Image (tube, grey):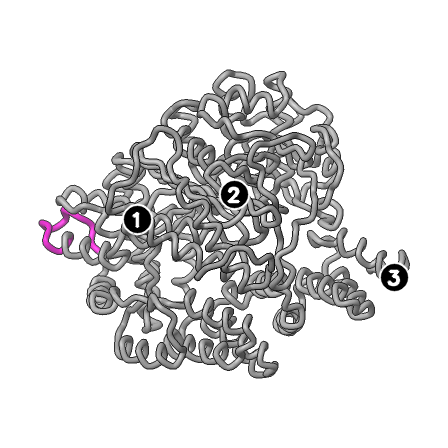
Amino acid sequence: MMQCSKYDWSAGALALALLCGLAQAGSAHAAGAASAPSAALAARLAAFDGWVAQRMARERMPGMTIGFMQDGVTWVQGYGYADLENRVPATPRSSYRLASVTKPMTAVAILQLVEQGKVDLDAPVQTYVPYFPVKAFPVTVRQLLGHLGGIDAYRNPQAEQHFKEHKTTRQSIAVFEQFDLIAEPGTRYRYTSYGYNLLGAVIESASGESYGGYMRRHVWQPLGMDATVMDDPDAVIAHRVRGYRLAGTQVRNAEFVDISSRFSAGGTRASVPDMLAFGQGIHDGKVLSAASLAAMVQPMATRAGRLTDYGMGWETYPTGGRYVISHSGQQPETATYLFSFPSRRLTLAVAANLERVNTEAFAQRLFEVVTGEPWQLKTYVADAAAQRHYRVAQGLFEEGRAYAERTRAPYADGAATRAAFQQINGQALAPDAAAVRPFIDAARHPAGGRVFLAAGAGMAEALRASGIDLDRYSRGGALAFARDYVRLSQGAPAGALPRFEPAFEQAVAALASSWDGTGAIAWPAAPVSVATLDTTLRAAFRGQRAYPDFMPELLELAQTAAARGDAGDALAAGRLAVALYPLSDGAHALHGLALLRAGATDAAIAALRLALERDPLGAASPAALNGAAYRLQGEGAIGPATAVLQAAVRLHPRDANLHDSLGELYAEQGLRAQALAAYGQALRLDPGYPGAAGAKAAMRQLGGESAVATP
């Protein structure tokens, strides 16, 4: 029998508490006057409850609220605890820090002021914020909206991310106003909250109101967001959740940080129903014109013609061939995510009171429950020569179907579509494999003529005109999309539809045929041993050209095994990954990291080198290994995290940031000499790298001013 009285936040007791919190909060699921889910959907949501409880227990999550809104149906559910110490359940009304989900709200306010003639997107920011110092190049409002203004992010995180005192707008700008630009505006994407702080100052100057006052009157209240407020530690805020962090496997109270310094970039607090109301409301035309909305969701590009996959306040990358905009938030006390599928009138939102947790996974699972569609079909192609054919098919599908879902208007005229096909046939499918990759990498970007979009949108339009419902490709994916178009074009009168090269048509047919037989194979719903997986999956995939890519599941399996101290199972998962997916950089990186945990350093380095050979920018890149180390550090595995960074600097000895991270981990362990050496090497390699100021500050703390000596 489940008992909910024991006060003990060990892993097992926390899992029990989460289940108890779920039971206490389970009755509160509907928000407002919206209709309830259908009986079939309600049954799927009930099963979702169990999945959430298991996932939250595994990740030690104290509390979370999640929900969706679609076609008059609103469902919101709280899980676990908003306050562990006082046993306050998380509910739909729980108030979470939104963190960077504030940014699209700020972008809406800017575009409203543009509509009112009070802001010019292409004016220098000093037009509205005259006290902001003039830089080497003009920085415009538009560039700030798209993180293209050359404004840096945190340079001294030890100070800038831990402010305890309240800051005014002027004081918030003063934190970074003397920073030099990191690049000429328009030339480099750099995600930064400081740029959005400047936009908050623009709003105040152009409107004559405080940021919070303007947002309340012109954005939040018109959308019925009555629970959305500026976060204020002194204010009494109804249903405020307590924030937590993990120290190893133990849940601890989050550090107190006054986030007024991030006011218009991440300084708000709201409930999940308010997040949903925002995501849905802007597409109902309540706060923006159709023209402003269209501009807002258009991805920006650098001057060199590379898409940033960020518009004005929204991430804009297509997913599973769907048109979606989104934004995540990570901050002390919180983790949030907001997804909007405008053409489906579907919005999903999730907020948790644990730092650095993957809230996206919960939103993805809820999407699958609500729609019955997989979030993303993951396909592995077992033949190296055919992998580029699949990459072409995937690019055409993602760009083309997402565009078709967004609008029924043709993207390009017939001549432009045929020209895109000719480019793909002549370059993406050329015999010289070395020349193919750069073309494919550029094909979705303006620098590459956006040929995937021009050709893919034409394919989608032709398929839809033939009577095919494009929704079928949510389950069939890129291979079914490409095969159906190939069949359609082959059966059309000569010249009626553009054709692909015969080699591509034949490869697509073979891959799609293989996928027809393997695509329905699912990862086991119930836990099974690695040995059982090895036997089952090897048999199922033997001799196949295309089959499901279970790398995320194998990675999770290995991480879970490592976390419980089972190095054997972690290694077995890594070996199975390499056996099933030998062409995958992620498989070899997983094997390498498992070998590191087992202490086999030389073998681990060899495996990581294989990963680099397969993709220099993939799972063994400096950024990926740095991220893996910080994940381990967050779990309290400081030794394994250090081992990862030690291996990383052997693989990438010229990367300053890796040496900086290694210095940070050494310092955390009290290894002063090693920390000073690592920080010093980072500064010698690149005195101006983004973390240089923080490294110098850390070295002063470790050894005084004389420790900071660079050429």
Which region is colored magenta? 489-499
C-alpha gap between disc 1 and disc 2: 22 Å
Residue 148 rendering spot, x and y as whole percentages: 57, 40
Label 2, on which residue?
A: 302
Q: Amino acid at mark 2?
A: Thr
Please state which of the two labelled residues, at mark 2 or mark 3, is closer to the viewer: 3
Q: Residue at x 50, y 24 (%)?
A: 219
The image quadrant where one finds the C terminus is bottom right
Q: Amino acid at mark 1?
A: Ala
Q: Relative to the observer, which residue lies in front, 446 or 362?
A: 362
Q: Residue at x 21, y 51 (%)?
A: 472
Residue 448 falls within the magenta-colored stretch: no
Mark 3 secondary-structure assignment: helix
Q: Count residues near mark 2 (Cα–Cα under 10 Å), then give few for <14, some for 14-19, many for 20+.
A: some
Q: Check the image and report above or below for 610 versus 464.
A: below
Q: Amino acid at mark 3?
A: Gly
Q: Classify residue 251 as left or right of residue 218.
A: right
Q: Quadrant of residue 293?
A: top left
Give yes or no for contact between labels 3 and 1 (Cβ–Cβ under 8 Å).
Answer: no
Q: Classify residue 701 as left or right of residue 408.
A: right
Label 1, on which residue?
A: 420
Please state which of the two labelled residues, at mark 1 or mark 2, is closer to the viewer: 2
